[in-house]
Each structure stands twice: as C-alpha cells, then as structure tokens.
Amino acid sequence: MSIGSDGAMVRPDVRGEAAATATSPRDTSFIRWATARRRRIARRRLIRGAIGIAAVLALWEFMAKAYDLEIILPTPFTVAQDVAKMLLLQEDKWLYGPTIYEHLGASLLRALIGFGLAAVIALPLGLLVGRVAGVRETVGPVVKILYPIPGVAWIPLAILWFGLSDQAVIFTVFMGAVFPLYFNTEGGARQIDPFVVDAGRCFGARGPNLLVRVILPATLPYVIVGLRVAIGNAWRMIVAAEMFASQTGIGFLLTESRFQFRAADLMSAMVLVSVVGYLTEKVIVGTIERRTTEKWEVAAA
C-alpha cells in the first residue's frame, strides 16, 4: 500500500508487479537456457540413436553379403522394399489371406485387450498386496508359485480351454503381462515412505481415498516401469500365441512365411512388430508418464 497525492491509500497493482517479476531478465535467461538444454539433449539422443541403428544395419548388411546368407538373411534394403510392398499392398503374390493391415489390426486388438485386462487386475492387486499385510500373506504365495511358469507354457492350456480362438491368444497375452505389472506395483507400494502415508492421513485420507490419492501417486514410477515391461511382454506373447492358436495376426504371418520359405516376408513381419510395439509403448506408457510422473516431478526413491 502507498499514499497518493490526495492523502488516500493506493493499492499497488499486484498483477503488474508479478508480471514484471516473471519476465525479469534473470528469469528470461533461465528459460532460454533450459529450452536450449532440452534441445541439446534431444538432438544428442537423436544422433546417438541414429548411430546405434546405423551400426546394427551395417553389421546386418555385412553379415548377409560377406557370408552369402541373403537367402536366409535378406539385406536391410531388401527387407525395407518388402515392407514397403506390404504396406502399399503391392505384393505380387500375397499368400497370407487378409491384408497386412488386417493382420496388424488383429494382433493390436488382442494385445491391447490382454494388456488392459492385466492392468485392471494387477494394479489394484499390487497396491493391496503391497500395503495390506493380510492380503500379502494370502495372495503373495499364490502369485509366486504361478510366476515361474513361462508364458509360452500357457499356450497349450489356453488352446485346450478356448480352442483356436481370439480368447486363447488374449489369455496368453494376459498371463505374460500381468506378472511384471503386479510385481512392480507391489514393490512400489511397499517402498513408500511412511511419512507420506502419515501426512495423507493427517489431511483426512482414509481407506480407498488414501489408496487413490496417496499410495497410487507415490507408486507411479514403479507402475510406469511395470507398464513398459508388461506391454513388451504382451507383444512377445501375441506373436507366440498366434503362431499356434490363430489364423490371423503377425504370429500367423511369421509361421506361414517360414512354411513358404520367404525370409524377406518373415523379417518384414518382425520389423513391423518392432515398430508397432514401439509406437504402442510410446502412445500408451509415454502419455501416462508425461501426464503423471513428469508433470508432477515424481521420481522413484
């Protein structure tokens, strides 16, 4: 407050002062420095990633030509041409029934359903097991007994239960994705600082409210890791399950390519799995990470 010429009290323009402070030279220089630093890091990662991929492609090209393996190990250029023909539907003699987009769509749908079901089961169960001793002592041994069973070992049982169907593939994907997500969530819930929980209780958080507003946000870094591993497992299991239990999908395409002895088609399907799996992880897990842990600046202890 200040006194005007007429003796009256004059209220200062707080917003103007705040704006002036926010745009001070020091703050402006810091923003420029932070922006330039982020761009340098992004550029460095892009360059190093490109170098790594180029090295792998060069080794692949050398191995294929130096040892005359192009029949069973087509060169990167040959595979790239085959991928382009698949995506542009220019294959001279397509031997795999539905188009590549139908195969990719079928695999993507099954992977997302299996992964989604795993998340719905594993997240709340992991939180409960991590925070409630009675649930941990009851459920923990059951999960630890099932966990060592390899994911592919569930495929024959899934076929026996569900036949050669989408349900068999989805069940196999679920079994491959649920455990990494469960164990990461459970481990994160057990690692929470007791002071954080006590602070939440002091502000009135109890029961489910405490679980959602305090426990889950504090566990998020571990959950993100679990989601990333689980979605990778989902794509690995979708290919394995489709090889045995489906007439569509990328796994079916891989099996048929082997029977037809078409190595370029086989490797093209592998490349497409890699690309679609990477994009799926970026869209789903990357979006969750940006809107939670990065936004809230949460980090694992």
Image (cartoon, helix red, strand yellow):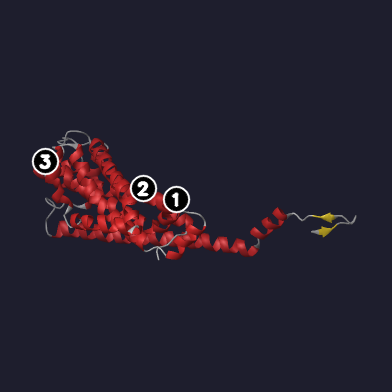
In this image, 95 relative to 212: left or right? left
Query: How far is the residue under mark 1 from the one under mark 3?
Result: 42 Å
Could you tell me the amino acid type at mark 2? Ile
- Residue 192 shows in the view: yes
| 8, above or below 117, in the image | below
Could you tell me the amino acid type at mark 3? Leu
Q: Using the image as rendered, state which of residue 1 and residue 104 is in the foreground.
A: 1
Q: Nearer the viewer, mark 1 or mark 3?
A: 1
Residue that appears at 35% across and 62% down: 190
Q: Nearer the viewer, mark 1 or mark 2?
A: 1
Callout 2 environment at 10 Å: few (<14), some (14 to 19), or many (20+)? few
Residue lying furthest top: 98
Mark 2: secondary structure: helix
Q: Nearer the viewer, mark 2 or mark 3?
A: 3
Residue identified by numbered label 1: 209
Residue identified by numbered label 2: 284
Counting residues from the start of the chain, the first of labels 1 and 2 encountered is 1
Query: How far is the residue under mark 1 from the one under mark 2?
Result: 25 Å
In this image, 48 relative to 159: left or right? right
Mark 1: secondary structure: helix
| 265, above or below 11, in the image | above
Q: Are marks 1 and 2 in contact (CB under 8 Å)?
A: no
Could you tell me the amino acid type at mark 1? Asn
Query: How far is the residue under mark 2 from the one under mark 3?
Result: 32 Å
Residue identified by numbered label 3: 160
Counting residues from the start of the chain, the first of labels 2 and 3 encountered is 3
**Quadrant housing residue 186:** bottom left
Q: Position of residue 250 (x, y in %)?
A: 20, 42
* Quarter occupied by the C terminus: bottom left
Count of marks, rendered view: 3
